[in-house]
């Protein structure tokens, strides 16, 4: 268990179980990522295995977060005509969405009297982990808390995105992709790709733009 193989195998097995359960029930709330997290946490708690032991192999998977984020440019390239046609509303939507996310964190932190450090750690919650952890460190937050906030935000977006689009009657695929990618980064994008190629491409674009926008705007606002 002290070797990286344990963490890698546990992660892959948990995710495959999540995929199998998702295929069986075919419901948005039965998200493979959510199920995998529950299974891994449950297994570690039940067996008494420390997180540090699991992390030896888990870090190998985390290493690929950066390359995977770059690979998301592939579906964007395939749908580049939509970006050229709707570039202004797309960029405006991403920037407004990112700004709203930051302001909501600040307002909620003030309302519940959270410490300044905790608020700064949660501000980058809607951008992907490689960018969010760096932004958190630059503005005075705690990167480990930021990673937890980003993960929770992403899983929440991945699970609820189809439901929100349905009940809020958001039917345009470009709008769906921009909303999901801006709010819930790469984890939400995994759901957007199952909704359609256009949604996946627009969500992929939103990850990068939202990350850059947050990196520039967050320090100014704070």
Image (cartoon, rainbow, N blue to C red):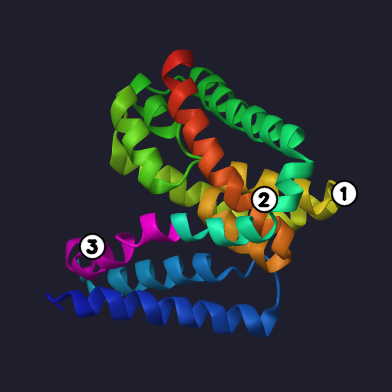
**Mark 3: secondary structure:** helix
Asked whether the residues under the numbered discs 1 and 2 touch, taking CB atoms below 8 Å apart as contact, a structural biologist would say no
Q: Give x and y (percent) for residue 69.
A: 46, 55
**Mark 2: secondary structure:** helix
The residue sitting at 43% across, 29% down in the picture is 215
The residue sitting at 47% across, 82% down in the picture is 16
Q: Is residue 97 above or below residue 151?
A: above
Asked if the magenta segment contains residue 60, the reply would be yes
Q: Earlier in the sequence, mark 3 or mark 1?
A: 3
Q: Is residue 159 visible?
A: no
Asked if the magenta segment contains residue 184, the reply would be no
In depth, the one of 91 and 139 nearer the eye is 91
Q: Is residue 123 above or below residue 16?
A: above
Q: Disc number at residue 202?
A: 2
Q: CA distance from mark 3 to mark 1?
A: 42 Å
Name the quadrant of the N terminus. bottom left
Q: CA distance from mark 3 to mark 2?
A: 35 Å
Q: Give x and y (percent) for residue 35.
A: 51, 70
156 to the left or right of 148 = right
Check disc 3: other Cα within 10 Å, few if <14, some if 14-19, many if 20+. few
Residue stretch rendered in magenta on the structure: 52-69
Q: Earlier in the sequence, mark 3 or mark 2?
A: 3
Q: What kind of secondary structure does the magenta stretch mostly adopt?
A: helix
Q: Disc number at residue 51?
A: 3
Q: Disc number at residue 169?
A: 1
């Amino acid at each position: 268990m002290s070797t990286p193989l344990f963490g890698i195998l546990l992660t892959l097995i948990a995710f495959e179980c999540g995929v199998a359960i998702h295929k069986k029930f075919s419901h948005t709330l039965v998200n493979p990522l959510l199920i995998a997290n529950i299974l891994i946490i449950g297994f570690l708690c039940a067996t008494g295995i420390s997180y540090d032991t699991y992390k030896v192999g888990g870090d190998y998977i985390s290493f690929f977060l950066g390359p995977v984020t770059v690979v998301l440019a592939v579906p964007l390239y395939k749908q580049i005509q939509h970006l050229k046609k709707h570039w202004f509303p797309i960029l405006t939507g991403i920037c407004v969405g990112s700004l709203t996310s930051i302001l909501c964190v600040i307002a909620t932190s003030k309302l519940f009297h959270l410490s300044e450090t905790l608020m700064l750690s949660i501000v980058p919650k809607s951008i992907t982990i490689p960018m969010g952890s760096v932004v958190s460190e630059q503005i005075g937050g705690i990167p480990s808390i930021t990673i937890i906030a980003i993960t929770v935000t992403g899983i929440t977006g991945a699970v609820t995105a189809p439901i929100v689009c349905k009940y809020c009657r958001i039917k345009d695929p470009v709008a769906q992709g921009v909303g999901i990618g801006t709010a819930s980064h790469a984890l939400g994008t995994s759901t957007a790709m199952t909704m359609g190629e256009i949604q996946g491409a627009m969500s992929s674009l939103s990850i990068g733009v939202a990350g850059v926008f947050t990196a520039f705007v967050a320090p100014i606002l704070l």
